[in-house]
Amino acid sequence: MTPEITEVQTAVSGGVGLITLNRPKALNALSLPMVLALLATLQAWRDDPGVLAVAIRGSNKVGRPGTPEALFGGFCAGGDIRFFHQAALAGDPALDDFFTEEYTLNHLIHNYPKPYIAFMDGIVMGGGMGISQGASLRLVTERTKMAMPETGIGLFPDVGGGYFLSRCPGHVGEYLALTGDTIGGDQAVAWGLADVCVPSEVLPALWASLQTLGSMENLEQWIATNVIAAHADTTGQNDLFYIKNYAAFGLGSIASIVAALEASGTKPARAMAATLRHRSPLMLHVVLQQIRRARSMTLADDLRMERDLVQHCFYTAHLERSGHASETVEGIRALAIDKDYKPVWNPARIADVTPDMVAPFFVSPWPGGTHPLKDLA
């Protein structure tokens, strides 16, 4: 009898805890049960002396489940936005639980006391970044498609996005956060969002060899020889041309950023400006502040800020908007529900967003001592 295939498959082999995200038809988008399973697994392995390290990968839609063809090639496309839409309309408290538990998981991964190795092959977006950016070793490939595309659905780059994007070189963090543009593995390494780019064809062998080590000393040697040294020529360098090219994103406002891009005369800059004009004007203003505030924050403080922000996104009390009227629900509707790709943003233009619309996003809706992430160290 074939065993039931779960969405989070776990095993321990050779002293390594192995996690496979197995929801390929949804591009391994994270559901609340998946988040809770990951959190419980990592907490258990943290205190288990038989687990020396953890490795995580995704599965894809190619080949029969469990075969080599179905492994790798798709890491995680983010959170389950269809669930977000349904829960927001129904007033389901599971929506609040999702973000609280997900951000707790993100914090645990960043502070995990054992090596945590992320095989970031294929799509790595949104929540997929949240479960990989805190890894001790972040492997990408030529198939990696990395992005934080949340402004396209009236949201913001959460899961610690403020923290890790703000620490990219120059102002590429603002660029990635505001546009949601997709980058490849080499660029991820160059901008500090991955550690090494390896050929996708070597991933099965690397995954298998991890399970033969048996000691921390052997693991450290495995990283040094099989990953870092073997693929040193694929390790990116900070590209000063790109950093300079994105200098417009260091300007003081969304309007000035767009104006500078449109005035630059280059095709890439005009494309960036066109992208920004299709994003939620309200959330562009919120995101610019998010990234800049996060530069001086600890991860825990950033996650608390992001938990505040996401609450305001779905329950925008200061604008008297919630449910279907919220910017985020409208963005998800246009992208994933009706698929008309024509979100009706409110306000509709960048110039119509006022400071009074933005400032309340950064006021916590929870009184002192009651924040759902108050215990994050």
Image: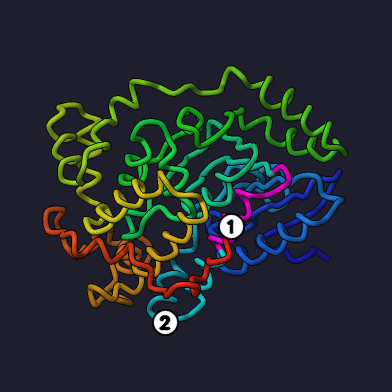
Say whether residue 300 is left or right of residue 327.
right
Residue bounds of the magenta highlight = 102-115
Q: Residue at x 16, y 28 (%)?
A: 264
Residues packed near mark 2 inside 10 Å, few (<14), some (14 to 19) or many (20 plus): few
Say whether residue 114 is left or right of residue 140.
right
Residue corresponding to mark 2? 91
Work out whether residue 261 or residue 268 is closer to the camera in this orientation and state it: 261
Say whether residue 285 is left or right of residue 173.
left
Outermost front residue: 368
Residue 334, given in percent of the width and then of the height, sits at: 30, 63
Q: Secondary structure at mark 2?
A: loop
Residue corresponding to mark 1? 377
Magenta part, dominant SS: helix
- Of the numbered discs 1 and 2, the one sitting upstream in the chain is 2
Q: Residue at x 43, y 44 (%)?
A: 147
Residue 114 is covered by the magenta coloring: yes
Q: Amino acid at mark 1?
A: Ala
